[in-house]
Image: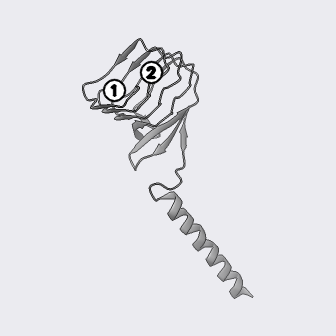
Amino acid sequence: MQRTRCGSIKKLICVVLVAVMLFGFVPGGIVASSTAGNFTYRIIDANNVAITGYTGTTANLVIHGTLSGRIVREIDASAFQSNTNLTSVIIPDSVVTIGNSAFSGNTSLTSVVLGRNVTNIGANAFWNTRLTEITIPDAVTTIEASV
């Protein structure tokens, strides 16, 4: 009887390990999000993260260059979408990519300062905002349609 119980436990451990390997460590698998203050983010690698969401209500947001000790490299698609509280945003120099629709629908957003290392701005990144001022750095090489 003990042999069966031990065998069942080994099978369960194997199934759990396979699931973790498939969904936890393989690119394209299930990506868990983490939080730091009002930000949610995903881990890109050991040193870098991408902001995936924001739950704060501040009007004038300064995004810091690190979250939980990792460098903020990207602002993912729709990360700040439809946040009507934001009126201005300062994006740190560490960010290189701003995803599609990242700030779209922020109907109160009037001012954005992009960090000097932003190279890519996704489609509709600032669609349906009230931008009157935006600082675009020389590093930008790609601006997708309908920004």
The residue tagged with tag 1: helix, strand or loop?
loop
Q: How would you rate the neighbour count of disc 1 (Cα within 10 Å): few for under 14, some for 14-19, many for 20 or more? A: some
Q: How is the image coloured?
A: one colour
Residue placed furthest toward the top: 132
| Image position, residue 63 (x, y; %) | 44, 27
Using the image, determine if residue 127 lies above or below residue 144: above
Instruction: Identify the residue under disc 2.
Output: 89
Residue placed furthest toward the front: 145
Using the image, determine if residue 60 lies above or below residue 53: above
Identify the mark nearer the N-term, 2 or 1: 2
Residue occupying the point 54% across, 43% down: 34
- Given residues 84 and 73, the one toward you in this image is 84
Residue occupying the point 50% across, 33% down: 79
Asked if residue 41 lies left or right of residue 138, the reply is right
Q: Which quarter of the figure is the N terminus placed in?
A: bottom right
- Identity of the amino acid at label 1? Gly
- Identity of the amino acid at label 2? Val
Mark-to-mark CA distance, 2 and 1: 11 Å
How many tags in the picture?
A: 2
Using the image, determine if residue 91 lies above or below residue 60: below
Instruction: Identify the residue under disc 1.
Output: 115
The residue tagged with tag 2: helix, strand or loop?
strand
